[in-house]
Amino acid sequence: MKKQQVVVLCVLILIVTISSSSPVPTILDTDIGTDYDDQMALSFILSNPEGFDLKLVICSTYNTTARAQIVAKTLAIYGRYDVPVAIGRNTGVKSIWEYQWAQNYTLDQFQREGGTVFENGEDALYKELQKATPNNIYHLIEISPATSVGDVLQRLKPEIAKNIRLFAMAGSIYRGYGNSSQPSKEYNVVEDVTAAQFMFNTSWSYFGLAPLDTTIFMQFNGPVWQQFLSYRNKNTRVQLILDSYTTWYNNGGKDIGAMEPFSPEIGTSTMYDVLAAILSLYYPKTITMISRQLPLIVTNDGFTQINTVQGKSVNASVMFESSNPYNSTSILGIVTLYSIIFS
């Protein structure tokens, strides 16, 4: 059997796996707009309603209103006015290179069209998490610095967290940025160390981690990206990605680092956050990856370290099953992009 046929067969098996289970109540915490992976993760979640029962999207850190406009426009294109947008605490000014794509779509317009916006994002997150019970397990997908979650954890009863499965893009255990042999201070952790410490110290029902060790290889390019491009001007949801990605790229995204070259014509930047969404969708499986249970802590200077005395157990996707990580990420690229094409 040819390699391409094997890959397609794998994708079909994964699709069947999703359709055989019920949607899980899900909350997304995102800092969408600064890096592009958040937009791809949100689109992937919205493209898989058979797996995700999306209850809330909260926008965290820096200009959270601008981030909320990006989320709102995305929800509108998908016709998902049932999903509330929550505005987390504004923590300052930062480049949001994707914002131009959404700047003319106001939150007022989103609400006129039937959407809901919560001005106090942390309060909305707290209230939604309270709905988690042993018979109604929630998934929390954390693809932002944990600022909002950290605020909420200080008042959330510990027993509630035992009804929540956390899937986070955070940390660096064995390898760092650029595939360095030395761990890095990963952005989502070091941006708010205190909040990250709250998150890692909490006793969740399950904690699935997508660290730099694997996420640095998450770029989608080659034949699958070219097929994605073939739907340009033919598919509204593909066009959403291409238009917003081009805006992000031209406004500054082109200057960020990545393992492989990228542009709207040849492939994506690093899709770190998509891996956390995939871990949530396919739980308890960790497709194409090797997961290890590790006792992890966040140090005061922002490193994610193994600590057998203080660390809580985390299921960390630390490597891929294939010796060539791009063989694995090509499958994940097909899963992600095909979901968007055929949603």
Image: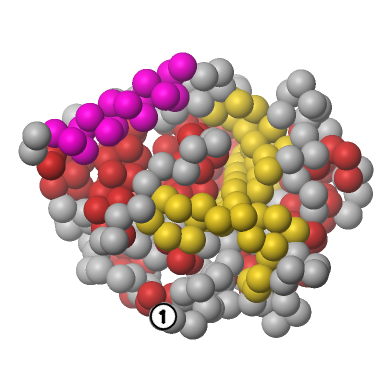
Q: Quadrant of the N terminus?
A: top left
Quarter-wise, where is residue 256 in the image?
bottom left
Left or right: where 196 falls relative to 247: right
Q: Residue 185 at what x, y percent from top left?
A: 58, 77
Examine the image and state in which quarter residue 231 appears: top left
Give the quadrant of the C terminus.
Answer: top left
In the visual, does 168 lie left or right of 193?
Answer: left
Q: Residue at x 26, y 49 (%)?
A: 330
Q: Is residue 65 magenta?
A: no
Residue 300 visible, this angle: yes
What residue is shown with label 1? 180
Say whether residue 84 is visible: no
Tag 1: amino acid? Ser
Q: Residue furthest front?
A: 308
Q: Name the image quarter holding residue 339.
A: top left
Q: Which residue shows up at 47% across the image and 74% down it?
A: 175
Q: Nearer the viewer, residue 15 or 305?
A: 305
On the picture, is 211 further left or further right than 267? right
Image location (x, y in percent) of residue 14: 36, 29
Q: Is residue 109 left or right of residue 314?
A: left
Query: Residue 197 at what x, y percent from top left?
Result: 76, 66
Using a 10 Å C-alpha cutoff, classify the residue at mark 1 as few (fewer than 14 neighbours), some (14 to 19) or many (20 or more). Answer: few
Vertically, is 9 above or below 226? above
7 falls in the magenta region: yes
Q: Main secondary structure of the magenta part?
A: helix
Residue at image location 64% in from the left, 27% down from the top: 25
**Magenta-tinted stretch:** 5-20
Q: Residue at x 28, y 44 (%)?
A: 331
